[in-house]
C-alpha cells in the first residue's frame, strides 16, 4: 500500500475545481473550499434526533458493493501502517476499525429497514461534517476511471506518453505532498512545468505507455487512473495504470481556461463539450493544457487492485468517497445524503452508506467531497452530472461497544 496513490483528481478538475453545474447551486466553487480554523473540528456529533439522516432508507439502498467496500477498508485497517493516521478528529484506530466490523455484522443480520435504523442509533454515534458554512453544507461532485486505446510502443497513431515517476521527484513521505525536484547538490527546487516536460522530451526513457492525443493524456492526468486497451504492435491486451506522484506546480482547470478564452460557456463545461472543441481546434486546446503547470506520473497496476484510492485499496462504484484526508478520518463508514443524476440527466435522491477511501487535488476543506461513479463511458456521464449540495455523516461505534466488536 502506497499512500501517495490517489485516484480522485476526478472529471470535475477539468473545470475550476468542480463539475459543470447541473443543479440549482449558484455558489462560487471557492466558497466550498473554505478551510477550517486552526483547532476547529471538521465533525460534530449529532445530538438532535431531528438532524439524523434517513437511516432506514440508507439500509434499503445497501447492496453487495457496500460489503465489498467495507472489506476493502478492513484490509487497510489490518495494516500496521494504518495506525499512524489515528487518532483523527478524536477517533481512535480501534474505534474506527470496530465500527466497520459492527456495521458489517448488523447488515449481515438483515434486520429490516426500521430495525436497522433503531439498532444503528443504539450502537453508533453519528457525526456530521460542519460543511463549508458551519451548518453542514457539503458540495458533492463525481469522478470516474476512463478507458482509452493505447500502445506500449510509439507509433504514428500513439505518440503521446504517460510517464513513470521520475527519480528526482521529491514527495513528503508522511503526507504525500509534492515538494519539488531534487538537484545533484541535494537542494530541492520547483519541478519543471507541464510545457517544459512535454515539449523537451526531458523524461525520455521514462515513458510508460503511449496514447492517441494530448487531451487523452490530460484526462488520464485529471482522473489519476485509466484502463487502457492496447492496440499497438505488441498486439491486443489490457493495461491498468494509476497515480504514482505529481509535481508541486499549481493546478489550473482546463474548463476555466476555455471559458476565459471564449471557447466554452459557463453552463456547458462538460467533458463532451471539451472533446468537441478539441476535435475542431486541437492546437488551441493543447496550448491551454500547457497552462496547467501541474504534472502527474503513473505506474502499472494489477487489474485486481485497480482502480486504487489514496489509502491503497480498490475503490468501489458509488461506495467510495473522496475527502480531504487532512481533516477527516480515513477508511471509515460515512453516509452521503445528496442528489445525483440518472443517465437521462434527471435528478434523484442519493442516500448511500459509503467508505472514505480516497482523496483528490480539488477535494480540500470540509465543504467538498467526491463520489466515485465507476469505470468507462457510463460512469463518465454520471460523474459529469454530479454537482449537488448535501450532508456528510460519519458513523462510529459508541465507545462502550468498541471492545465487543474489536478484532
Image (cartoon, rainbow, N blue to C red):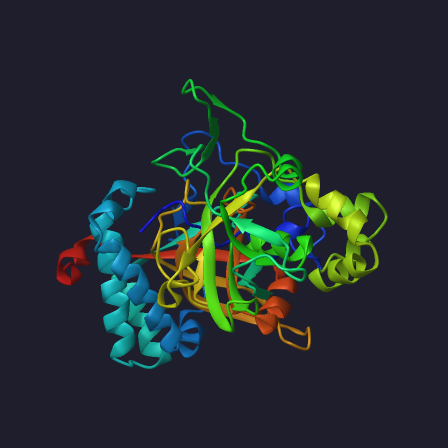
Q: Residue at x 33, y 72 (%)?
A: 67
Please identify the quadrant where the C terminus is shown.
Answer: bottom left
Where is 337 relative to 399, above or below? below
Q: Nearer the viewer, residue 13 or 31?
A: 13
Instruction: Report whether residue 49 is seen.
Output: no
Q: Is residue 5 left or right of residue 104?
A: right
Q: Residue at x 31, y 63 (%)?
A: 72
Q: Where on the picture, by quarter, is residue 380? A: bottom right
Q: Residue at x 34, y 71 (%)?
A: 68
Q: Nearer the viewer, residue 153 or 119?
A: 153
Residue 348, how many percent across, how many down? Answer: 60, 73
Q: Nearer the viewer, residue 253 or 240?
A: 240
Q: Where on the picture, by quarter, is residue 20? A: bottom right
Instruction: Report whether residue 326 is seen.
Output: yes
Residue 365, how many percent across, how many down? Answer: 51, 42
Where is 82 relative to 404, above or below? above
Q: Is residue 216 left or right of residue 53?
A: right
Residue 366, how many percent across, how many down? Answer: 50, 45
Residue 231, how many percent across, how many down? Answer: 57, 70
Amino acid at each position: 500500500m502506497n499512500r501517495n496513490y490517489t485516484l480522485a483528481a476526478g472529471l470535475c478538475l477539468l473545470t475550476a475545481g468542480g463539475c459543470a453545474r447541473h443543479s440549482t447551486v449558484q455558489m462560487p466553487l471557492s466558497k466550498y473550499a473554505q478551510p477550517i480554523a486552526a483547532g476547529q473540528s471538521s465533525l460534530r456529533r449529532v445530538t438532535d434526533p431531528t438532524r439524523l439522516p434517513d437511516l432506514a432508507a440508507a439500509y434499503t439502498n445497501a447492496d453487495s458493493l457496500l460489503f465489498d467496500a467495507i472489506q476493502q477498508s478492513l484490509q487497510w485497517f489490518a495494516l500496521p501502517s494504518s495506525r499512524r493516521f489515528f487518532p483523527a478528529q478524536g477517533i481512535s484506530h480501534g474505534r474506527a476499525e470496530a465500527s466497520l466490523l459492527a456495521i458489517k455484522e448488523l447488515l449481515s443480520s438483515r434486520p429490516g429497514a426500521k430495525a436497522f435504523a433503531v439498532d444503528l442509533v443504539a450502537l453508533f454515534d453519528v457525526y456530521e461534517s460542519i460543511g463549508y458554512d458551519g451548518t453542514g453544507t457539503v458540495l458533492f461532485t463525481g469522478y470516474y476511471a476512463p478507458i482509452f486505446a493505447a500502445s506500449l510502443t510509439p507509433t504514428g497513431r500513439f505518440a503521446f506518453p504517460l510517464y513513470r515517476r521520475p527519480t528526482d521527484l521529491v514527495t513528503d513521505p508522511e503526507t504525500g505532498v509534492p515538494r519539488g525536484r531534487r538537484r545533484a547538490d541535494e537542494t530541492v527546487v520547483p519541478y519543471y512545468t507541464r510545457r517544459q516536460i512535454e515539449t523537451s522530451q526531458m523524461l525520455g526513457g521514462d515513458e510508460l505507455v503511449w496514447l492517441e492525443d494530448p487531451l487523452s493524456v490530460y484526462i488520464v492526468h485529471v482522473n489519476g487512473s485509466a484502463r487502457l486497451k492496447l492496440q499497438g504492435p505488441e498486439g491486443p491486451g489490457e493495461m491498468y495504470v494509476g497515480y504514482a506522484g505529481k509535481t508541486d506546480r499549481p493546478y489550473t482547470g482546463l474548463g476555466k481556461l476555455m471559458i476565459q478564452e471564449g471557447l466554452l460557456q459557463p453552463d456547458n463545461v462538460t467533458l463532451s463539450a471539451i472533446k468537441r472543441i478539441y476535435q475542431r481546434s486541437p492546437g488551441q486546446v493543447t496550448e491551454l493544457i500547457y497552462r496547467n503547470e501541474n504534472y502527474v506520473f503513473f505506474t502499472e497496476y494489477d487489474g485486481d487492485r485497480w482502480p486504487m484510492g489514496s489509502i491503497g485499496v480498490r475503490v468501489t462504484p458509488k461506495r467510495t468517497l473522496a475527502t480531504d484526508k487532512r481533516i477527516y478520518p480515513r477508511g471509515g463508514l460515512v453516509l452521503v445524503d445528496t442528489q445525483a443524476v440518472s443517465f437521462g440527466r434527471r435528478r434523484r435522491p442519493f442516500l448511500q452508506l459509503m467508505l472514505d477511501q480516497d482523496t483528490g487535488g480539488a477535494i480540500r476543506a470540509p465543504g467538498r467531497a467526491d463520489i466515485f461513479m465507476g469505470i468507462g463511458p457510463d460512469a463518465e456521464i454520471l460523474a459529469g452530472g454530479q454537482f449537488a449540495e448535501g450532508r456528510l455523516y460519519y458513523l462510529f461505534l459508541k465507545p462502550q461497544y468498541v471492545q465487543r466488536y474489536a478484532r
